[in-house]
Image: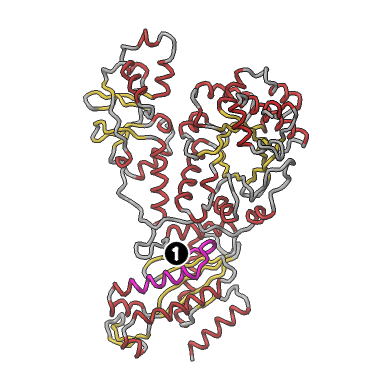
Amino acid sequence: MTVSEIMACGLLSIHFQPLGRLRDGQVVGHEALLRGPRGHALASPDALFAAAAIQGVAFDLEVHAVKLALSGWAQQGMAGQLFVNLSAGALTALVAHPVGHGVWGLLKDLGVPTGRLVVEITEHERVDNLPRLLNATQMLRRMDVQLALDDFGDGRSSLRLWAELKPDIVKIDKYFARDIASHPDKVQTITALRRIAETFGTQMVAEGLETEDELRALRDMGIELGQGYLLGRPQPELAEALLPAAKEVIDSREIAVLPSKTRQARSDFALGAIVQEVAPLQASATHQQAARRFLKDESLRAIAVVQDGRPIGLVNRQSFLNQYSKPYFKELYDQRSCLLFANTEPMVLDAAIGLDQLTDVLTSEDQRYLTEGFIVTRDGHYLGMGTGERLVRSVTELRIEAARHANPLTFLPGNIPLTLHISRLLNGGAPFVACYADLNQFKPFNDHYGYWRGDEMICLLARTLVAHADVRRDFVGHVGGDDFVVLFQSDDWHSRIETAVADFNREAIALFDDEARERGGIEAEDREGVMRFFPLTTLSVGALRVHSGDFHQPEQVASAAAAAKHKAKQLSAGVYVDAREVSASERSASERAARSASR
């Protein structure tokens, strides 16, 4: 049975998969997905569309799927938004002949509110006539139909297409959501894409959400919408709510611990690091010469025009070819200067400008560089070209890297990311425990054995704290020196930190020499320069339980946790739990430790 016969016999059906808002779990719409005859060789959409392409009816199948989606959605009350898929080629063909295929009449007959209809453009790599696609999308907007780009970031998508089409919604390929909770590179990429979306005023949809960790991470990163099996599977009926597992994650106040890289921020970064060497056109170059350059190299987005080595203009590929393809252009302008239709006021940036200035460029009102690129100079002379895509990516990566300020010894996040995580916990209203860890008698140890052995002690503490934290729920930060902070969301935080203290105290003994271990300490100078005996180094932790509304600023949490740490050191209690809000078992444990230390 051919695809045409399958369509004629009414054997195709539509399933609807919900899209959810990640901040509150509301179903905002559904994507319509075509299904072939159950049990048939063409049951799957991939097989069905592959066969349609071979049989020359791919366009007919796409239009048929849209009609089925509209009818099914209307029959079920047209709740929320409806997302329908169309290839770029099918969309332009449909708009070119709007009446003949019956879609527009069906919209009218069904009374479809076009403001809630979203056309997803698929197969980005096959956009071979961008002006026609732009005309088609403009017609959709005149009808109040919204536009979405599907599977962005799948390796074939173009940032330029995003900039040119200015879609209302961009759906990010499922690759980036998969295991994002353990991949810092994906976190950085999604963060960069979110900033681009903010620049263009675009909503982002994270596709392929399948695990609770993925959903929690993307929710906490500020991604607005999500879609995937965890939220809801494709089904014949419209979903009234997301699946319980997804709703539980969204309603939970638990905050994700986002993975981060451990390399240090590069404060010496300059624009010259991302420059592309592109031979310029001379001021005397003609349109014919410019056309040859573009036709020879399809990767060229723009070419600078220089005079005496200094840039005086920029020829944008798309604008130039649009002009060059017009009737009689070659006859009239082929031998005339390429500056005639060039941008004579392009963005020009010096190769030496650094991160702060690049950030200013990224947020400036002039956003043309995102599509046409910009010129890079050194001392006023042409050096090469830069692209908006590389600039956005580089600035985003460097900003994330600079904000991390990983400790150079332990590679754990420092004060800035620690403060940011406390802010996220406070803003989310999530209950957590802030544990401030500090070493007892560390300075004498460091003075006696030297900083190399002191670094070993600090690294041991870092490894111990990390080993007893849940990487998905608990945040371990290195404030500096021998001071560490652990932000626990684990319910069993108390046993975790007590075990960490015990393990550290036991393993730290190995860093002393035999004589010190035998004596139970070392002779070293105190802060007044007087030699005296100091016991073996141990760990003290002050624990502060934080509930919603207790604090409003991260600094308040840090200050209260530090006070609890000082109390722990005074009492030599191991773990001291701030007594303002503790359970009876925790209070008795702290009191027992304090009494034992005083005897």
Q: Report the number of numbered marks.
A: 1
User: Residue sitting at 71 percent across and 43 percent down?
Assistant: 235
Spot occupied by residue 564 in the image (x, y as percentages of width and height)? 49, 74
For the view shown, which residue lies furthest in the front direction? 1
Answer whether residue 411 is magenta in the image: no
Q: Quadrant of residue 225?
A: top right
Residue 217 visible in the picture? yes
Q: Amino acid at mark 1?
A: Gly
| Figure check: 364 above or below 183 | above
Spot occupied by residue 69 in the image (x, y as percentages of width and height)? 70, 33
Spot occupied by residue 280 in the image (x, y as percentages of width and height)? 28, 26
| Figure check: 587 above or below 91 | below
Out of 323 and 63, give the one closest to the viewer.
Answer: 63
Spot occupied by residue 191 in the image (x, y as percentages of width and height)? 48, 46
Residue 140 visible in the picture? no
- Looking at the rendering, the stretch of residues picked out in magenta corresponds to 455-475
Quadrant of image for the N terminus: top right
User: Residue sitting at 67 percent across and 47 percent down?
Assistant: 232
Answer whether residue 456 is magenta in the image: yes
- Tell me the residue that label 1 is attached to: 477
Out of 204 and 38, give the one closest to the viewer.
Answer: 38
User: Residue sitting at 69 percent across and 49 percent down?
Assistant: 242
